Image (cartoon, rainbow, N blue to C red):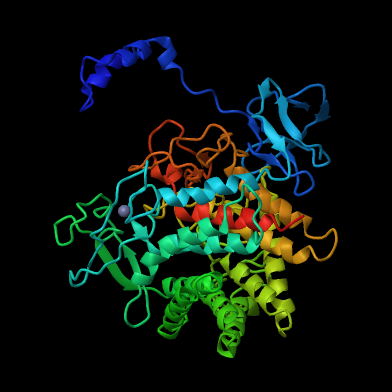
Amino acid sequence: MNRRKFLGTLSGVSVAAPAWLEAQAGPPVNDPVEKDVPAKTPTIALNHLGFRPRVGRKALVVRVTGNESPHEFSLRDVVPPFHFTRPLTLEQGDLGPCVTADFTDLDRPGIYQIHAGSERSVPFFIREDVWRRTLPKAVGYYRYQRCGVDVPGVHPICHLDDARRRDNDEHVNVIGGWHDAGDLRKWMDPTMLNAIALLNLVRNIPDPQPGDPTHEQILDEVRHGNRYFLKMQDADGRVWHDAAGGVNGDNSDNHWTDNITGTADDRYINVTKLERIAAMFAALQALVSQSYSPSDPAYADLCLRAGVRAWDGSKRKGSTLDIAWWTLAACELYRATHQDRYRQEAFAMGRALMARQATTYMAGQKQIRGYWTEDPRASEGVVAGEPAPAPYFNVVYPAMPALALLELAELFPEAQDHSKWRDAARLHLDEYAIPMAERNAYRIIPSGLYLGQPTPETYRPLAGELTYRYFMPVRKQFWWQGINSHLGNYALLAARFAVAERKQPGSGRQYVELAYRQLEWIMGANPFGATLMTGEGMRNPYPHSRFVGLIPGGIMNGIAGNAQDEPVLDEAYAIDWRTNEYWSPHVAYYIWAVSTLERVR
Ligand SMILES: [Zn+2]
């Protein structure tokens, strides 16, 4: 079928194509030009944005694909004559052999290109704002995801009939919020993370420069999201799980509606109330109240009262992740109110989190410690006759326990446990995250630590009973996907720790490097040479974005793994949600981590 005939099959396009289409009509699909496949995967894995002159490490990774590999690389300014040539060193790592080099000493601002073997890299900058200049795009992503309003150029007004309760069919107005991903559903947990990240950007960049997202823009965006979050709080203070998430785990609510309440296409509210959702809600509302109190004290007060109701209405107990979020809620409520009850409970939660950390070597090995578990006795070490506790795993919130302790340390510098909180986060980074990242040339932190082989697929042996995978298991359950949220959450933790450490000159550099290496993977320093944010870098895969298509600043789930834990990415327009779907947490962590790293000078 040639292009003209193809156009004719589309509804609304006449077979007699207009003259301007005729003029542009290309060759038929069997022409060799249209059979060209995308260029072969590059071997140069370098982030496509570039580097800040004096912050972080400038690392080059080149994959070794055959018997021959380049021994040196040359770097040149795109504008001659500046150039140099340096050796590459072979590095055997988990994700395949690579040759690598370091050019951290190059601080000269410019736009450069690297040559290695027969390849040229994507041009990249060395300039101070190389990451910061991506923030407006990332922040702008949320406007495309707004629900309940007309978003010009994206979609007309939508979902004015959201939604009816699953349990009793009663209609409740939950209009607003953001579509969460490459679909139209409104999960509370990941979309509240959007608002939390945006308000942390305001904290991290208190004096925006021309080109930065403005505080006015961010406060307007957060208020839009929060319009929905506030409506999702039940009379008992606790918070519902989602609107339009689908019934019984299916995708049935993932559609546009007629905007008329009471018709068959109305979507559902999942009225399940989880501790973590209430904790995130309380943290968010306390943060909102601080952020809006100068400009809108009435709104700030309303939100704070909602946050306090979520706090009071909950048990504030649960899993390691629940406790981490309750710790963050206690910190934000203390910041907002200065009430001692939040401080006391924050301290108690800090102790509960530290108790769940494997501070000694467990599972029959002496290489790795400092990871988290679900066992409140983990810090006591191995209990005779009992199996070692399984490591904590969460692909969205892997670094949250350590991050919560860092938050405590920042907020309460005079507390008795202050150095213990900081040391727990340091142990996690120094004796878990960094040594694990050093097992591959890209320096990404594997997504999970395990005991043995829980499912029939590859788990990489570490030591003793401990094993690990870079990517989520694919034989465990239907839900597995790319790990950009995991990388972003760790980038945030390492960035926060670097900021805390920078008070001592020269210290903390390894944490800045660790943070940027996680983000660089998202921005092209990966085995596919693909940037996973739409509108930045090159070789963006087409996203799984079923309703609005490309969204500038959207970050997709990212590279996942197969059963052998080898990286996979859909580059063939298969619209694979596992690797290519946009999702809130990736963008949220990107904004939060990049803005935190702007505090490092
Ligand atoms: Zn909508």
Is residue 405 visible in this depiction of the protein? Answer: yes
237 to 69, vertically: above or below? below
For the N terminus, give its image quadrant. Answer: top left
Q: Which residue occupies 53% across, 76% down?
A: 329
42 to 388, vertically: above or below? above
Relative depth, front residue between 250 and 467: 250
Residue, far left: 263
Relative depth, front residue between 393 and 532: 532
Q: Position of residue 299 (x, y in %)?
A: 45, 74
| Lateral position of residue 145 relative to residue 323, left or right | left
Is residue 462 visible in this depiction of the protein? Answer: no
| Lateral position of residue 156 relative to residue 74, left or right | left
Q: Position of residue 18 (x, y in %)?
A: 27, 16
Q: Position of residue 226 (x, y in %)?
A: 42, 66
50 to 189, vertically: above or below? above
| Lateral position of residue 163 relative to residue 419, left or right | left
Residue, far right: 505
Q: Which residue occupies 50% across, 76% down?
A: 297
Q: Position of residue 547 (x, y in %)?
A: 33, 43
| Quadrant hosting residue 91 | top right
2 to 73, vertically: above or below? above
Instruction: Count the labels in the image.
Output: 0
Q: Which residue occupies 84% across, 41% down?
A: 105
For the C terminus, give its image quadrant. Answer: bottom right
| Lateral position of residue 415 relative to residue 349, left or right | right
Relative depth, front residue between 268 and 110: 110
